[in-house]
Image (tube, helix red, strand yellow):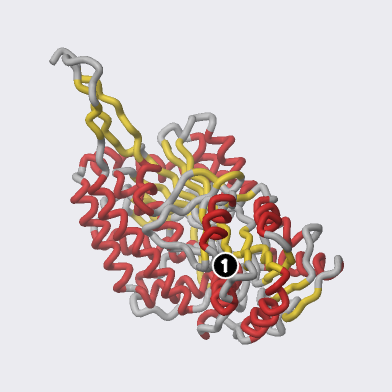
Amino acid sequence: MVLTDEKLFKSQAHIAGKWVDAASGAVYPVTNPADGGLLGHVPDMDGEDAQRAVAAAESALPRWRSMTAAERAGLLMLWYQSILDHTEDLARIMTLEQGKPLSEARGEVKYGAAFLQWFAEEGKRVYGDIIPSPANDRRILAIKQPIGVAALITPWNFPLAMLTRKAGAALAAGCTVVAKPAEDTPLTALAFAELGQRVGIPAGVFNIITTRNPAPVGYAFTQSSAVRKLSFTGSTEVGKRLMADCAATVKRISLELGGNAPFIVFDDADLDEAVAGALASKYRNSGQTCICANRFLIQDGVYDAFAERLTAAVKRLRVGPGMEDSGQGPLINQAAIDKVDSLVADAIAKGARALCGGNRHALGGTFYEPTVLTDVNEGMACVQQEIFGPVAPLMRFHEEAEAVQLANDTAFGLAAYFYARDIGRIWRVSEALEYGMVGVNQGVISTEVAPFGGIKESGLGREGSKYGIDEYLEIKYLCMGGL
């Protein structure tokens, strides 16, 4: 791996300010999804290592939470600037271990850094209240305090931004952190920890452990009485298991889980804008985003025109290794491409047609052709399951109410998108869609300033925005009598 700053490449975990191995000495390989090449090895840690990291965070908590918000903000701002100063190296690490095009990786570095900047500022605005008292001899106050040690479990598709979105809020609030990055993409998180150490984040405040067997580590987090908050981004299945396990110690939890995002195009939409939004929402990161469009609901009057324009645009996407800065990189691993391949095969077997793509790419490995499917119906698995790949299934609808019904007919409620111009329709549909986030004439909605999160089986809580820091704070009521 060729980096300007070679010390950003780490092969050890980070606990209590030190670079450490697993207690067992075990390691596992990290590979490049574009070619299967070996990038390096990192510690394969277990529950014992997780407990060691939690103990370090617990030990560092009194000092960190006693610092002023301005002092914590100053360190976060130094970390933010250090990330920006190392954008190219961080982007290269990310592309090599995750596969996304280099230009997308650079964008994620800037996006991820923005959460540190945002929460550095927001941490100085954690206000309480003085509440009118029912009696003249007492005063009632409400203050906010850090919840304590926070355990963060992050996914592989955005290995920096999903970490900073959680850690920025936790650290600004005065919590200390133990983070477990996804087993496929630990190197970006370790480089982030290295930069934090350089700018002076105190030992034990931010800890990173790595493992390819996350279940024992997650269980150690959920069972630890020292961990008062757990934040997880990943599958609904795992999120439910963590939620149940957290009941043993009644932890505060945040869950950002699976989605099944509808992308609705009404007959009054600007089709050029809709196609541009569809490309950005569906094919960014090879369709491997938790809020990417999963089902395309197109009104009869514009169905054929939209399908034609989208297909033409998708055919222009260039597939290749992320380091070549192609338009679309590989999927993360073999299981991912097998799933996408099976979903497309199921749809075609049930009557769908591929307007383009529909096969594993000639490049081999985990590359898949950008695909558009037509004549899709609700009986197909790609409509019911999260695809997490570069496949756009197009369905017809007739009336507005039908589109809303189809969009809401899922257990998930993370993100939804629709394109329309009629102002009445925009209000009606925005309010009727059962989702935590709705993009109206916009295919890319993520930003540090807005609350990110879902409803139903897509999760609990919000990240980013002024609301994100509240996830790491407890409200304490003070009643002062005898006045």
Q: Residue at x 19, y 50 (%)?
A: 70
Q: Nearer the viewer, residue 217 or 98?
A: 98
Residue position for label 1: 419
**Percent position of residue 34, x then y:** 60, 77
Q: Nearer the viewer, residue 157 or 419?
A: 419
Q: Nearer the viewer, residue 322 or 116?
A: 116
Q: In which image quadrant can residue 121 be found? A: bottom left
Disc 1 is placed on an element classified as strand
The image shows residue 367, relative to residue 479, as above or below, that is: below
Quadrant including the C terminus? top left
Q: Amino acid at mark 1?
A: Tyr
Residue 99 shows in the view: no
Q: Residue at x 51, y 38 (%)?
A: 222
**Percent position of residue 239, x then y:** 58, 45
Q: Is residue 331 left or right of residue 352?
A: left
Q: Residue at x 63, y 60 (%)?
A: 262
Q: Is residue 69 left or right of residue 471?
A: left
Q: Is residue 193 left or right of residue 438?
A: left
Q: In which image quadrant can residue 401 be found? A: bottom right
Q: In which image quadrant can residue 287 be found? A: bottom right
The image shows residue 365, relative to residue 475, as above or below, that is: below
**Percent position of residue 172, x then y:** 29, 49
The image shows residue 190, relative to residue 269, as above or below, that is: above
**Percent position of residue 104, x then y:** 47, 75
Residue 26 shows in the view: yes
Q: Residue at x 79, y 70 (%)?
A: 375
Q: Is residue 380 left or right of residue 33?
A: right
The total number of labels drawn is 1
Q: Residues within 10 Å of mark 1 (few under 14, many from 20)?
A: many
The image shows residue 415, relative to residue 92, as above or below, that is: above
